[in-house]
Every structure is written in structure tokens, then in C-alpha cells.
Image (tube, grey):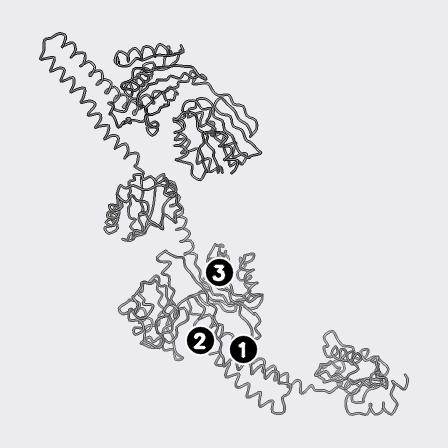
Amino acid sequence: MNGETGLSPEMMKVFETLPGLYLVLSPDLIMLTASDAYLRITAKKREDVAGRHIFEVFTPGARDQGGRDVANSLIRVINTREPHEIPVARFDFPDPADPAVTRSSYWRTSHTPVLNSRGEIRYIIHFTEDVTAQEVARQQLTASLEEQTRSAAKALQMSNRMEKLVREIPARIAILSGPDWVFEYTNPHFEAFFSQRSLRGKPLLEAMPELAGHEVLKALKHVYDTGETYSGTEMRIPMVRQDGGKPEDHYFNFVYQARYDENGVINGILSFAYNITELVTARELLQESGEEIQATNEELKATNEDLYQAQRNLQKLNEDLEKRVGLRTSQLLAAREDAIRERDRLNAFFMQAPAGICVLDGPEMIFELVNPPYQQLFPGRNLRGKPLLEALPEFAGHPICDILIDIYRTGKTFEGKEVMVPLASNDDGPVEERYFNFIYQAKHDIHGMVDGILVFVFEVTETVLTRRKKEENEKRFRFLLNAIPQQVWTSRPDGALDYVNQVVCDDFGQPMEVIVGSGWNEFIHPDDLGDCLRKWRHALEAGTAYTVEFRLRFKDGDYRWHLGRALPLIENGQIAFWLGTNTNIDIQKDNEQRKDEFLSIASHELKTPLTSIKAFNQMMQRTDDAERLAGFAKKSAGHIFRLEKLISDLLDVTKINAGKMIYNMQPFSLKQMLADTIESVQHMAPSHQLILEHAEDVEYTGDRFRLEQVVSNFLNNAIKYSPGEKEVIINCEVERDNVVVSVKDFGIGIAEGDLLHLFERYYRVDNTAMRFEGLGLGLFISSEILKRHQGSFWIESQPGAGSTFYFRLPLDSHNVAKAKRIGNTFYQDTTITITYYERSHRIYADWTGFQDLDSVKNGCLVLLEMAEKNRCSKIVNDNTHVLGSWSEAVDWVSGVFFPMLEKAGITHLAWVYAPNVFSRLSANKAAGVAAGNIDTQLFTALSEAEKWIDNR
């Protein structure tokens, strides 16, 4: 070691004799020498330390923080070449009296480098001072202060927590003081309910005079006199929420509990009330909300700050530390006692609260506080002092565990409503699905760190199950109402409409919300509205059945007759709601009108020939002239024939309606049948020449008599509606395995509006220029006869130019059309060809030849299947090649097929008319009645239809 860095013997002797504890270290931390005092205190000899590394002799233990601090300080001095002081460090030395025993001591240590002329370290002076006695005294005082601080802080925390929960509970809490029940305290929920009234400091009946005479006063007096807790459920109490307001009925669940002073004497009442008006009235679901509460105790907070300040200044305490600590301790003890009293008061308050409250402590969430209502949720289980998952193992894996962990991590509050939790009431009991409303709120220590969770809970299992049962019943009820094929509706007890079924929405073309919002007045015919309202008001006032006939406007703008009925549902002597139906009686009304017209016509038509026969009979009695008698007899025979025809038609209609029309199917010559019928009618109609222009000689199997009746009816109609004309032309041709008979006249013609109705019962063409006799039954009877022969009929007519009546009979009704199919892109039989065009993504349907209900159904269903499999939304429906009419399928197409198309996703339909007017009218009827949401356009040319749909 050179002289630049070493120590002279004189300097070493100086260091060795210093009274303090000194070490002299080389830059490499080799101990050069030590003071005698240092060797004594460490029980070392000089030869044990000289020339050895400091940490070879004094090796820091794994838990020796003091040794590690010395090492770090030395490294810092070597690196910075500046002195460094370690405030206080702990060292473990062998006891001089017993080296096998290690004793702990506390030292304040400093390291000072001595530099040479080049600024390099020559050696390091290590000085340490024993401050064990002072440090032990300080630690004891600090520990005492910390314990007092923790106790006061915990009391403060519990006080704040309890106060915060009181303000946060979603119940209306009040404290009534003295025998006059003066409002001493009301929580925010209570004050919010009476936000416009001043309550605090006033006796109950002065603050709420509307309670005078109410049974709730008896309950309060009973609690105050006896100390017995009183619980009320669903009690109706008239409350005035603002000064000068009117009482309104509210429903409460509540608990009244006596409050006692320090001598056990009752001095007030604690009130817990829950407003359940919405639940009782079943108009809104139970609502609970937690509000963020901000309230602090400024005096305790200032005290806490003083404690922190005192702790920071502990190192600077002088000889009067004991006195100051004692004074501070006395203050803290007084504050703690206050906090403890407040804690005990609030603890008693919460232990009596009707809501379930618990406190979960630490990350393991140990049940620290459990009040009786919370414990009653688990009557057979011990919770307090146990971790959550040990006390309630069924929580494992439930989302609530994740929620609690997140609250502990983030400090955020969580509110749950009607959360299903699988829980058992007893340790060995079955796990049940139970529902709770709850609030989870983090609690914090004095440093603001989360150290637990506050839990506030209500079990609402019964409420949830009751409501769900009600919702399920209502869902079933609505399902049943929607399944009824007539208009069904309900209204509130005051008559306000609150529900209509889907039939009403479909009929009116409006969603339920719009219909309910506007009410029936928007849709009832103005002429019927007054009578409806009068009868409805009477039913509401009397609580009796409601019945009325009125007209309702449908989505097509037409009014249709309905029979409205409604009955009240009575529950507990009160009307719960009204259930009503509107039955469509438009057809009945129309039939009634036609029946009345028919009876008038029948009376006239039957009376006329009878009157004539009677007159001719009287004239025959007055004359003996043979020629005149013969004339009268002939005219009487004509009227008798007419009377027989009218009676025969009435009898046939009766048989048709009863399904008792008998058909005698036998083969016969159709040509001969036509000739015989023409000859028979010709005798009765000498004014017209009936010409059989062409007739195929076809053998047909059917009821000859009934088909003669059809031909005779067609001929008589042609004669009747062509006065002044001379000819009626008859043809019979075979076309595509069908025989087609036509009867052409040159009379007045028939307007398009009458064509589709001609084959209906009692329908008669009315011409402004003349009236024609008859009951309007002939064509109806003819249509029924043709249907029984799988035939069809149609008319072509032009007003002023005449009409042609057609009927078709299949020659082989059992012939089944053979179909050709290529995948999902092509289908063909004798009545239809269907092609899917992938490029334009549309379907083309080409109907061909004569159609009936069976062929229309088969073709439509194949068309629908192809559209669904190709996910096609556009169809061209071409009727250009249709022969005759398909009117008997109109109702099926409009009522069944169009809804099926809409359900399958068809959005655009281009319909090309058939050549004859009768088919065109059928198309108009089908598309007009049931197009729904399908964009349907009718065309006379295929090219126009394709152009339109390809642009869609």
C-alpha cells in the first residue's frame, strides 16, 4: 500500500484511540484499522479485522436490512466520492456476555471519503453511533400512536361507512323523536319523496295532517308504548308530496322499531319504508336505484391529518416528546371514544335495518359484519368470520365472483337487479335459484386503498317469479288472442284501448302501436261513431256487456260491417280490463240485403204469373167462345210453365245448400243433348232463332238432365237479354281434351263490374233502361252443376254489342298431367311451364290451356318451391296462353298463395293478363285483395312485364 493511499502508524493510532466507533476502509473496502470502542462493541480482536474485507467479517444476513444499507451506502460513496449518511440501521451482533446469543441494535452510520490530490479515494472513514435506546423508545411511541391512529381511523371508517349506507339505502328512513314523533332525521330518499314539503323539526301530524285518523298512527303508538317492532305490508297511505297538494294513494312495506336512550327508555321510533305503489298497481316493475353519497366528518378528518403530521415529525421530537405524545394520545382516545359511540349507534341501527347488509373484509372477502336480515337469507348457515367461498361454496364459478373481484380491484360500485344466484338456505340443503337486488360498494382504508366490500341486498325471488308467471300468462293470453281468426282487443278499466291482435293490424294495415295510439274512432265509419260511443260509455258506467254493429275502414279504404262485443273481467269487485271482439259480418250483411231483395223479387215474380193465371181463369169462365178459350188456356199454360221454373230453381238451390243434389252420371251424346235442349227452348221462344252453328259429336259421361238445365239457362238468358234481336248462336267444340260450349247473343251486353258476380246466388243484372224478370238463381245453379262435373265457365261481353257465355267440360277428368323436371331450374306439365333464369335471378311461369282449382294449386306450389330453392324474389306470371277462366281458384290464390309468396321472400311480381276479360277480372281480384308487401304490377304484354321486373 503506497503512501498516497495508506495510513501512517501515527494516524492509525489516532483512529484506534478515538472514543467513537470508527473503521478505516481502503477503496476496496479492506479494513485498515478500527477503534478500540468499535472492537469492544463488536466483540472482535484487532487481528480479526485488520487486512480483511468488511463483509468477510461482518456478513449481512438474508434478513439483515441494516447490513444491506451499509453496503449500498459504501458503493454510493465509492461511485460519487461524496459523504453519505444512513439515518438509522439495524445490526445484529453477538452478545458480549454470551456470544451464542445475537442481539439487535440500531445505529446511525456515516461514510466519509478521504481524497488524494488527484481526487481519488485514499480511504473511507466508517463512523457509527448506537441509538438503540432512542430508537426503541421512538418505535414504542410510534407503535402506540399508530395503534391509536388505526383505532381512530377504523372507528372513523366504520362511522363514515354506516352513515354512507344510511344515505344510500333505497328506502325511506326517518327517526321520529319523543311522544309527539318529531322528525329528527330523514334520509335523502325520504326527503326526495317530499321534496316540496318541510318536515324536519315538526311533529308528525303537523308535518303530515293527511295522516289524521289513519291506522298507521295506531301502529306508531303501539311501538312507542310497548317497544314491539311493527311490520306493515302493502299498506295504502294517502300522502301529500308537496305543500298545498292533493293526497295521492301510495302503497308501502314498512318497519317501525323503538329507539332507546342510554337508560333503556324509549325516546323515539326508527321508520324504514319502501314505496311499492308500482308493484301493487302492476304498471311498472320494481325499481331500485342507489345514489352516490358524499359526506365526511370534517372534525375527524382534521384529526386524521394531525396524526399524519405527527407521524412525519416523530424523528424531530425532543425531550418533551413524551408530554406531547401523551396529550395527542388523550385527544385521539377522546376522538376514538366518540367514533366508537357513533359506530355502536350506527351498528345498532343497521343490525335493526330490514334490508340484508354485510361487510366482506380483505381479498378473501371474509364476512366481517352480517346483520340479522342478511343472516335470515341463510338461516341454517354460519357466515361471520368465514371467507365468502367457504361460507357459500355455491358462489364458485358464478359471475358474482368475477364482479366482486373486479370491485375489489377497481373500487367501482356495482348495482344488480333481479340477478339469479343459486343458493342453499342450509349447509346441507338443496341449491335453489333465488333472485336478488343488491349493491356492491368498495370500502377503503385510511390510505384510500380498497380493503373490503359493502353489500346491501334484498331478496326478490317471489316478486320475480310472480312477475314472470304473469308475463308467461300474458304471453299465452296474447298468443291465444292472436290465434283467434277475428279481431280481438283489450282496454283498460277506463275504456282506453291498450291491445289489438294481429288480425286487427292486418285488416287496418297499421302496427299495433299506431292503432292503440289513435283508438277506434280513427277507423269507425262517421255515421256509426255516435251510436258506438254512446253504447261504450253506458257499458263503462254500468260495467255491463257491450254490443254494437258498426263499419270499420280497412287498409284498402273500404268499410266492412262488424259485430262488436266486449265483457269486463271483474277481480276483487273491480273491473281489471275489458276483453272485446269484432266479428266481420260484412258477408252476412250483404246476404241479408240480398235476401231482402230476393224476397221482394220472389214475391213479385211468383205473384205475377199467379195473378195472370187467375185473370185468365176468370176470363175463361165468362166466355163460351172455343177460340178465345184456347187462347186463354195457352197463355195460362205459359204462366204455369214460368211458375214451375221459379219453383224448380228454388228447390234446386235448397238441394245445393243442403248438399243433396243428386247426379246421375251416364254416357250420352253431347251433340244430341244440345239439339234436344235447343228444340225445347225454341218452342217457348218463337221471337228468336236458336242456331246450332257447329257441334262435335262427342260422347260424354255426366248427368244429362242437369247439363240440359245449364244449356237451357244459358239460352233463356241470351233470349232475355237480347230484346229486339233475332238470333242466338250455339257452338260446341273439342279443345285440348275439353269440350267447350258457347252461347252468343247480340243484346244489351254486360258491364265488367257485373261479370264476376253473375254466377253468385240472387245476383241479377240491372240495366237502367229496363228490368228483367227472374230470381237471379239460374246462373248460380248452373255454376254448381258445372263444378260437380269438374267444369268451368266464363263470359265475354261488351255493353251494347252482346255477350257470349261459355262452359267447359273435361273429357277425361282422371287424366293426370305428366310432369318434366330438370333440377330446380325447369318444370313443365300440360298446364304450366316454369323456368328459373339465373342471370336475371327471376322465375318465369307460363300458364297454358284450361285451368281449374287443382291445376292452379299444383302449379303455384311448384312455383313457390322453385323460388325458395333458388332464393329468388322476382316472378313473371304469364297468363297469355290461358284458355277459359280460373275464377274458382281466385279465393285460394288471394287468401293462401299470396301470403305464402310473401313469407318465401318474393318482393316483385309481374302479372301478364289472359286474353279474355273474365280471367283479367280474376287477376285483378286476386292481386288487389292479397298483394300485401309484394310489389305487384299487371300488364297486357309480356315484353313490358319483363322490362319492368328486370329493372327491379
Residue 760 picture quarter: top left
Q: Position of residue 711 (x, y in %)?
A: 33, 16
Q: Earlier in the sequence, mark 1 or mark 2?
A: 1
Mark 2 or mark 3, which is nearer to you?
3
Find out whether the residues at labels 1 and 2 contact each other: C-beta distance under 8 Å: no
Residue 759 shows in the view:
no
Q: CA distance from mark 1 to mark 2?
A: 17 Å
Q: Position of residue 254 (x, y in %)?
A: 37, 66
Q: Earlier in the sequence, mark 2 or mark 3?
A: 2
**Amino acid type indicated by mark 1:** Ala
As drawn, the residue found furthest toward the top would be: 626
The circle drawn on residue 27 is: none
Q: Position of residue 706 (x, y in %)?
A: 32, 16
Find out whether the residues at labels 1 and 3 contact each other: C-beta distance under 8 Å: no
Mark 1 or mark 2, which is nearer to you?
1
Q: Is residue 928 above or below residue 647?
A: below
Q: CA distance from mark 1 to mark 3?
A: 30 Å
Q: For this view, does 601 lie left or right of residue 132?
A: left
**Amino acid type indicated by mark 3:** Gly
Q: CA distance from mark 2 to mark 3?
A: 29 Å
Q: Earlier in the sequence, mark 1 or mark 3?
A: 1
The foreground one among 916 and 487 is 916
Label 1's element?
A: helix
Residue indicated by mark 2? 345
The circle drawn on residue 416 is: 3
Disc 2: CA contacts within 10 A as few (<14), some (14-19) or many (>=20): some
Residue indicated by mark 1? 153
Residue 178 picture quarter: bottom left
The foreground one among 560 and 682 is 682
Disc 1: CA contacts within 10 A as few (<14), some (14-19) or many (>=20): many
Q: For the N terminus, give its image quadrant.
A: bottom right
Residue 245 shows in the view:
yes
